[in-house]
C-alpha cells in the first residue's frame, strides 16, 4: 500500500488528497501524512527491489539502536550499558518492519544521541534538529515523540548542575527557543495545522483504536505487543 502510493505520486506528480485505492471509501478525503516515507520506500524499491527496501529498514532500526546506546550516561557501568542495549534491541521487532514507524524508531535514537550530551547546543545542531523535525512530520505521526524529547531536554537544561546561574538561564532560553522552532517546523507539511488536528481526531477514533493494535493503551495490548513497551520503560530508565 505504501509502495503503491509512492508509485502513484511519482506517476501523477502530486500527493493524493482522496484515497485512490479504497473500495468502500473510494473518493473519500485522505490526509496522507506519510507521503514522504512513501516516496522514499518507492525510491528504494525502484533502485533495488524489495531487498533494498528490507535493507533500508534494517538500517533505520540500527540507527535507532545506536542512538539509544550513545545516549546512555557516560558514567554508567558496562553491565548497565549491556542491559540497556539488550532492552533496546528487544523493542525493535515492533519497528523493524517495512512500515513508517521505522522512521520514528530511527529518529528517536538520533534525538536521544543529539540531546543526551551535556555540551551546549550549537547553531548547527539546532538547525539539524529542526530539519529532522520537518522530515519526521512528513514521514510518520510519531513526530510528537520528537517534541516530547525536546521538552524534556529543555527542562533538564534548566536544572543542569555545574553552570553559573546566568549561564544556566541563557542555555535554558536557547533550549526552549529550539522547542518552539521545532514545534513551528511541524507545520511544514502539505496540510499545515490540519495535520495536528487530524492526528488528535484519529487517536480519539474508536474505530481506529479497535483495529490498529499499536494505537491501543499498553495495558490493553496482547502480551507479545505489551512486553516491549514495558521493557522500553526500563531501558529509558538507564539512559
Image (tube, rainbow, N blue to C red):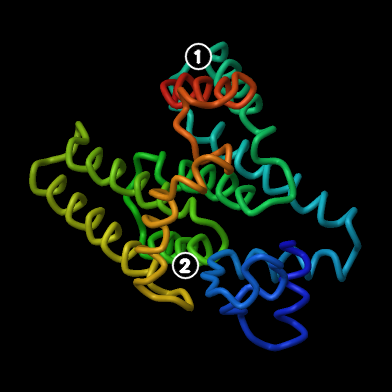
Q: Is residue 110 left or right of residue 10?
A: left
Residue wearing tag 2: 134
Taking depth in this image into account, of 155 and 213 the one nearest to the observer is 213
Residue drawn at x 41%, y 39% as measured from the top left = 116
Taking depth in this image into account, of 39 and 120 the one nearest to the observer is 39
Q: Which mark is residue 39?
A: none
Residue wearing tag 1: 77
Q: Quadrant of the N terminus?
A: bottom right
Q: Residues within 10 Å of mark 1 (few under 14, many from 20)?
A: few
Q: Residue 153: percent from the left, percent from the top?
A: 31, 43
Disc 2, SS: helix
Q: Is residue 35 left or right of residue 178?
A: right
Of the two numbered discs 1 and 2 on the same chain, state the one appearing first in sequence: 1
Q: Quadrant of the C terminus?
A: top left
Q: Residue 173: percent from the left, percent from the top?
A: 17, 56
Residue drawn at x 73%, y 47% as measured from the top left = 59
Q: Is residue 216 above or below residue 38?
A: above
Q: Residues within 10 Å of mark 2 (few under 14, many from 20)?
A: many
| Numbered circles on residues, count | 2
Q: Residue 132: percent from the left, percent from the top?
A: 49, 61
Disc 1, SS: loop
Taking depth in this image into account, of 189 and 149 the one nearest to the observer is 189
Q: Residue 91: percent from the left, percent from the top?
A: 61, 29
Q: Is residue 28 above or below residue 80?
A: below
Q: Is residue 65 left or right of residue 40?
A: left
> Quarter-wise, where is residue 70 in the image?
top right
Residue drawn at x 35%, y 39% as measured from the top left = 118
Looking at the image, the residue that sits furthest to the bottom is 13
Looking at the image, the residue that sits furthest to the left is 165
Residue drawn at x 36%, y 59% as measured from the top left = 122
Amino acid at each position: 500500500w505504501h509502495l503503491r502510493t509512492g508509485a502513484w505520486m511519482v506517476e501523477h506528480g502530486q500527493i493524493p488528497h482522496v484515497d485512490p485505492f479504497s473500495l468502500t471509501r473510494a473518493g473519500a478525503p485522505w490526509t496522507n501524512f506519510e507521503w514522504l516515507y512513501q516516496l522514499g520506500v518507492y525510491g528504494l524499491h525502484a533502485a533495488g527491489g524489495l531487498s533494498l527496501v528490507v535493507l533500508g529498514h534494517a538500517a533505520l532500526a540500527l540507527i535507532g539502536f545506536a542512538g539509544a546506546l550513545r545516549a546512555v550516561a557516560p558514567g554508567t557501568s558496562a553491565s548497565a550499558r549491556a542491559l540497556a542495549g539488550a532492552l533496546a534491541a528487544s523493542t525493535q521487532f515492533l519497528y523493524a518492519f517495512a512500515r513508517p514507524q521505522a522512521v520514528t524508531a530511527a529518529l528517536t535514537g538520533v534525538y536521544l544521541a543529539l540531546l543526551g550530551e551535556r555540551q551546549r547546543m550549537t547553531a548547527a545542531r539546532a538547525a539539524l534538529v529542526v530539519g529532522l523535525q520537518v522530515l519526521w512530520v512528513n514521514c510518520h505521526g510519531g513526530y510528537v515523540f520528537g517534541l516530547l524529547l525536546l521538552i524534556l531536554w529543555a527542562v533538564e537544561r534548566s536544572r543542569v548542575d555545574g553552570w553559573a546561574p546566568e549561564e544556566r538561564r541563557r542555555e535554558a532560553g536557547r533550549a526552549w527557543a529550539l522547542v518552539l522552532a521545532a514545534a513551528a517546523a511541524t507545520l511544514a507539511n502539505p496540510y499545515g495545522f490540519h495535520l495536528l488536528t487530524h492526528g488528535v481526531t484519529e487517536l480519539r477514533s474508536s474505530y481506529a483504536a479497535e483495529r490498529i493494535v499499536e494505537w491501543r493503551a499498553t495495558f490493553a495490548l496482547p502480551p507479545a505487543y505489551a512486553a516491549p513497551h514495558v521493557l522500553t520503560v526500563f531501558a529509558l530508565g538507564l539512559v
